[in-house]
Amino acid sequence: MSGSAGRADTADRPGPFPFRQPDLEWTRLRAGAEHTLADFRRWRDANPGRVADHVERHTAALASPGGRLRLPGVLAGRPLAGPGWPGRLGWPGRQRARLTREVVHFGVLNMAEVPGPDTIGALLADGRCGLPTPRRVLAAMDGDRGAAGVVDALRRQLPVLDGLPETAWVTERLDRLHGALPDAVLRAGGMGKVLRAMAAVLVIAAIDTLGSAPAEAREHFARVLPAAYAFGAAYAIVDDALLDLPGGHLPAAERERYAALISRALATGEPVAAAELPDHPLAEELALAHAAVRERYPADRYRHLYQAAESMHVAQRRDAARIAGGPPAPAAAGHPELLVKAGMSRVVANIFARRALPDSFYARCVNTVLISQLRDDLIDREEDARCGRLTPFTHPGDGADPLYDLFAYTAYVAAEVYGGDPAVTDALTGYGAARLATHLSADPRRAAALARDYPPTDEVARFLRVASNAPPRAVRRLEAVDQRLRTRVGQLLDHRNRRVVDCRTFVADRLAYVNEVVARHCPPSRAGELGEIVAYAMAGQGKRLRPALTLMLAEGLGLDPVTVEPVLAAGELFHTASLLFDDLPAQDDATVRRGRPAAHLVFDEGSVQLAALSMVSTAFGLLARLDRWFPAPRVTEVIDYAGAVLGPDRLCRGQHLDLRMGRGAAPASGADILQMYALKTSTAIEAALVPLMMVVGRPAEQTALLARYAHHAGIVFQLRDDVLDATSSTDALGKDAGNDLGRVNIVRQRGLDEAHRLMAAHLAEAVDCCTRLPFDTRLLACMVRHFADRRR
């Protein structure tokens, strides 16, 4: 029998769902996952003795004196046939047996197959097959070189990468990713996850090319390497930053729009237009990675690859939505998403890394991955609970027992997916025991908490007791090398020089801090409606670019941010007050500001004016607080300076010129327009920077050079604003688009080409100022470049 009827027949039989390539579409995957999970529950309830025996095997792997791996069963009892299998065990035999177990475990969990003796022999023969020796990779890592040191360690262990242009490309991309990821993702070991995923793809590719001619292997790796980077980067970008990071680096509406763009790109294999991307470095990095994959894996030939990736993304989004929406259903209700998400991750890795997949691959791959998913959820239980993530191990009590299911599912896979293969059973129990014991022995309270939350069977209780009491150093030696690779890379790259981070990431990472500073220094007023107006204006989704610039300069000057908090809060009050005035009917008559109705449309217009005046007054009072950290005469100079730049000769004059030009009071030349830009926008940027130079007593020539930077940066910002006003939409900008139609600006007077020419000239001048200042200005240079190409 063939066709869909034959597939339905097969799917209705007992046993795991027989996934095949046509089943990679989301609805078929989820139906198959539900079938496998239902079959697992039936098998689990019918085989308590086999589950108990499997738990005992986990315990036996840890129970020998000193915590040393006992190597039960197939690897300890007798020699196995074939050149790759260990003989009777002395110390070299035990070491070889442990590595053999690791290779089998890698094959089962990552390639959905049991490596044969010849493959194992080749993998364990140091230096014979050109494969990376993970311990040597770890030993060769140079933490001082960042991502480049990690890639170089891989390259030295995988000579096939030598001289490939793709190797240099991946090094550059990893360095950029390191500078773009949120601080929280780095601290949680995000780069370790990226490199572990990359390494898995590369090892699969190396196994796939065992015995191939060198030229053939190089050609394969030239295609695989950029895909391996894309695979690892997507983990950190989509999973850790866009979906899991509390609050995220993107507003909720923009995050949803971007998720839809990703789904469309995966469904069609087509790129996302640059104009559609969120103005975020991670969005740009993911688009670039997608383009590299499309070039090497065209959608017309690899439709199954994009289908698998799309299904994984759907499962990720559904899982994230289920978490965000609270616990409406038992924890097990999310198991199909977990199985699909993890399963498609392995599928994508293998499509990237292997030239052909055996027919049995999909069924074994998808039906196996819940083992590692449940184990990871147990290990991440505390962190997930802190972050509010809903997993089987953080779900409120609903009668489910994920702890028992973890052992039971491992037993199910060994019995039903791999037919009781003894090497598979040993690898799963040995590695699983070591992985869990590493976690539990680090803090024995973890085992007690699990036993409290999930009353264990006698066998599970015994395992928890033995695992939590195992000597941590001995247990760590049992942990698989890929896990140690992730941990070590995560440690090496969990921090970075704040001055070389992408400026947009710098701003996003510090947005919560800036908002907290503003709220702390400007608490809600009791002044009735005026206080409500101030709160409304300050609570909008502002970009907070000016306080971010203040923090960037503080980094370059080596100042503690706490000492400049009055400048941060005052600067944001000055700026927001100017926006309230700008939006009034007598001036710009705007309807939208920071993604919401302009304040004068929500409150009485006269009250809005008074609220703006109160914000200016409050800001001057805040500047006076600088005397807690800096000499009073310098603070007086700052207050005097602030009054001058906000007064009739600078900021207010610029707004007045803008109004006169818009009303046709006098002809305006290009120079007049640029002067107006400098007075309106450059002045605000200067006011965010110069006070810091004044309070620390920097030489006048340095302060003047920084003021020149602000002059050119403000013009770049305003020219880009005019280009966006003419070419973008209100939704994309978060304020009225086309608002300059009746007003004079460079785009209307000289055209887009001239606007771009002027922007490039002023950008070059601003960057030149940065290079001439005698302190670190890389963040300031990055920011002015961002001004020139921002999308909102």
Image (cartoon, helix red, strand yellow):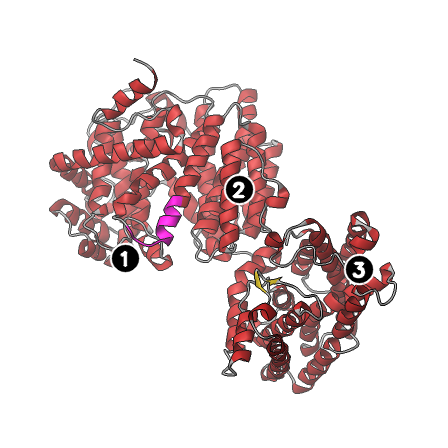
Task: Please provide percent x and percent y for residue 284.
Answer: 59, 45
Question: For this rendering, which residue is in front, 65 or 239?
Answer: 239
- Of callouts 1 and 3, which one flags the residue occurring earlier in the amino acid sequence? 1
Q: Identify the disc placed on residue 744.
A: 3
User: For the magenta stretch, what is the residue range?
Assistant: 318-328
> Element type at marker 1?
loop
Q: Which residue is mark 1?
A: 443
The amino acid type found where label 1 is placed reads: Asp
Quadrant housing the N terminus: top left
- Of callouts 2 and 3, which one flags the residue occurring earlier in the amino acid sequence? 2
Spatial CA distance of label 2 from label 3 is 36 Å
The amino acid type found where label 3 is placed reads: Val
Closer mark to the observer between disc 1 and disc 3: 3
Q: Which residue is mark 2?
A: 261
Spatial CA distance of label 2 from label 1 is 43 Å
Quadrant housing the C terminus: bottom right
The amino acid type found where label 2 is placed reads: Leu
Task: Please provide percent x and percent y for residue 516.
Answer: 50, 70
Q: Please tell me how crowded label 3 is: few (under 14), some (14-19), or many (20+) other residues with Cα within 10 Å.
A: many
